[in-house]
Image (cartoon, rainbow, N blue to C red):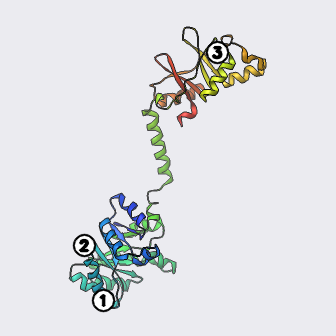
Amino acid sequence: MELYLDSADLKEIETAFQLGYLAGLTTTPTFMHRAGITDIDGTIVKLSQMVPVLQIEALGNTAEEIRDEALRLLDLGLDKGKTVFKIPISLEGTRACYMLRKDGMLVNLHLVYTVQQAYMAMSADATYVCPLVGRLQDQGQDALGLVEQCVEAVDHYGYTTKVMFSSVRHVEHVRNALNLGVHTITVPWKVMQKLTDNHFTDIGTQQFVEHTRMTTMRVRDIIRPANPIIHTDATILDALVEMSRSGLGAVTLLNEKEEIVGVFTDGDLRRQIETHGKEVLTSLLSKLEPKAPYQIEADAALLEASNLFKDTKVDTLLVVDKGRPVGMLDIQDLF
């Protein structure tokens, strides 16, 4: 099924055709005027150079006037093999279609509301016949039944005409078109943008991205630049200052041999103040009995860090590189 964009918005058109696989564009000067475009001919030429196939209106009261308008548009520089002239269904429209088709031009007989109109379009060798599904449904008509009849007529009688599903209002219409077996559909950009949306796909993609990140990225890739270190001959107040400077809730404690002896956290600070009062701030860190910190190598995968957080129930891991502290990993850093 050919996928066309239905739009007169230049920004939408430029964005949509970056996809690379759209079959073409259906548009109309009426919508161009509404969008504030004044140079209609210049815009048509510009669009013809942007899209694989351009479907644009050729209007007139008689078949000859319609033919002349189509020829005028071609004289602007449009490619006959890449331009489809949209003509409203009527007796003069079908006659114009037949004339243009004999001259090797492509025609879309549109604004089709009945299977009888579609039959006349097929008999006139229209390249496309275009029922307006959304408009018909607005009027309470069986639009999908009409489209089905058009497809069956093409298949049964062997017409070369393609049935184009138009006046698309929502994503369900695209599913309807696929189920009915139409040859072409023209979809507004706001609807096209939703065609790949799915809640479960979003969840699966998020899980895949997160799993890939956790298995391929290393701890050193996400640790913060701060690496708060303090020696045990400093005071608890010194540790508080270092924590505030680094923006982390912990500092690594080293002894005089530059060996890691523990980690002092903001939780340890609160407990010390609760037990001993604010005077404890002048106490030396060497008088504390810090617990050995949970450590992880800087080159470890994030998945290993995640598992260690789960196993230990701690919020912060000391990150080391060959025994030397290089930073801290907070559980929130994983996300």
Image-quadrant location for residue 249:
top right
Residue marked by disc 3 = 290
Residue marked by disc 1 = 65
Q: Amino acid at mark 2?
A: Asp
Locate residue 326 relative to residue 57 in the image: left or right: right
Q: Amino acid at mark 3?
A: Pro
Locate residue 326 relative to residue 149 in the image: left or right: right
Image position, residue 92 (x, y; %): 32, 90
Image-quadrant location for residue 153:
bottom left
Which quadrant, please, contains the C terminus? top right
Answer with mark 3 or mark 2, whichever residue precedes in sequence.
Answer: 2
Image position, residue 70 (x, y; %): 28, 81
Instruction: Give SS at disc 2.
Output: loop
Q: Marks 3 and 1, how far apart in space?
A: 94 Å
Instruction: Confirm or deny contact between disc 3 and disc 1 (CB under 8 A).
Output: no
Q: Marks 3 and 2, how far apart in space?
A: 81 Å
Q: Nearer the viewer, residue 274 or 179?
A: 274
Q: Residue at x 48, y 55 (%)?
A: 198
Task: Residue at the far top: name it.
Answer: 257
Q: Residue at x 30, y 89 (%)?
A: 65
Q: Is residue 313 visible?
A: no
Q: Marks 2 and 1, how far apart in space?
A: 20 Å
Front tag of 3 and 2? 2
* Residue 204's disc number: none
Image-quadrant location for residue 243:
top right
- Around disc 1, counting alpha carbons within 10 Å, would you say few (fewer than 14), some (14 to 19), or many (20 or more)? some
